[in-house]
Image (cartoon, rainbow, N blue to C red):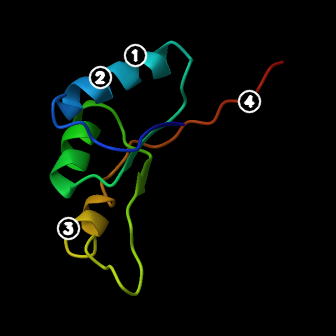
């Protein structure tokens, strides 16, 4: 999994997702995750390449992700195709 732990405001997230998508196609990375990203950022990235994991601080003391980020995690994904390993 390739995880972007902090979103860089100087680099468009669409560019990051596009590069990760190229890495997936090349077989160097299997999944893409974001950490501490806003809901809009998650949606923008997912429009370019599927975001598989989202990590946000969430506890009894901090429930900030609840109104926006948690619903954004429910983005529909294409069905996963599992192929048997031949080697």
Cβ–Cβ under 8 Å for marks 2 and 1: yes
Q: Could you tell me which residue is drawn at 24 percent across and 36 percent down?
A: 8
Residue 18: mark: 2
Q: Is mark 2 on a helix, strand or loop?
A: helix
Judge from the rendering whether residue 77 lies leftward or rightward of residue 67; answer left or right: right
Q: What element carries label 1?
A: helix
Looking at the picture, tell me which residue is in the foreground, 3 or 20.
Answer: 3
> Which of the marked residues, 4 or 3, is nearer the chain's N terminus?
3
Rounded to the nearest angstrom, the CA distance separating label 3 from label 1 is 29 Å
Rounded to the nearest angstrom, the CA distance separating label 4 from label 3 is 38 Å
- Whether 55 is drawn above or below 66: the answer is above
Q: What element carries label 4?
A: loop
> Which of the marked residues, 3 or 2, is nearer the chain's N terminus?
2
Residue denoted by label 4: 84
> Which of the marked residues, 4 or 1, is nearer the chain's N terminus?
1
Cβ–Cβ under 8 Å for marks 4 and 3: no
Cβ–Cβ under 8 Å for marks 3 and 2: no
> Which of the marked residues, 3 or 1, is nearer the chain's N terminus?
1
- Whether 42 is drawn above or below 3: the answer is below
Rounded to the nearest angstrom, the CA distance separating label 4 from label 1 is 23 Å
- Whether 81 is drawn above or below 25: the answer is below
Residue 68: mark: 3
Q: What element carries label 3?
A: loop
Q: How crowded is mark 4: few (under 14 residues within 10 Å), some or many (20 or more)?
A: few
Q: How crowded is mark 2: few (under 14 residues within 10 Å), some or many (20 or more)?
A: some
Image location (x, y in percent) of residue 16: 29, 27
Residue denoted by label 1: 22
Q: Could you tell me which residue is drawn at 20 percent across and 46 percent down?
A: 41
Cβ–Cβ under 8 Å for marks 4 and 1: no
């Amino acid at each position: 999994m390739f995880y972007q732990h902090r979103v860089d405001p100087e680099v468009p997230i669409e560019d990051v997702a596009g590069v990760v998508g190229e890495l997936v196609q090349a077989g160097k990375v299997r999944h893409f995750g974001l950490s501490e990203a806003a809901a809009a950022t998650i949606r923008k990235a997912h429009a370019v390449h599927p975001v598989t994991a989202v990590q946000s601080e969430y506890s009894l003391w901090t429930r900030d992700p609840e109104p926006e980020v948690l619903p954004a995690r429910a983005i529909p994904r294409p069905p996963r195709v599992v192929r048997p390993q031949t080697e």
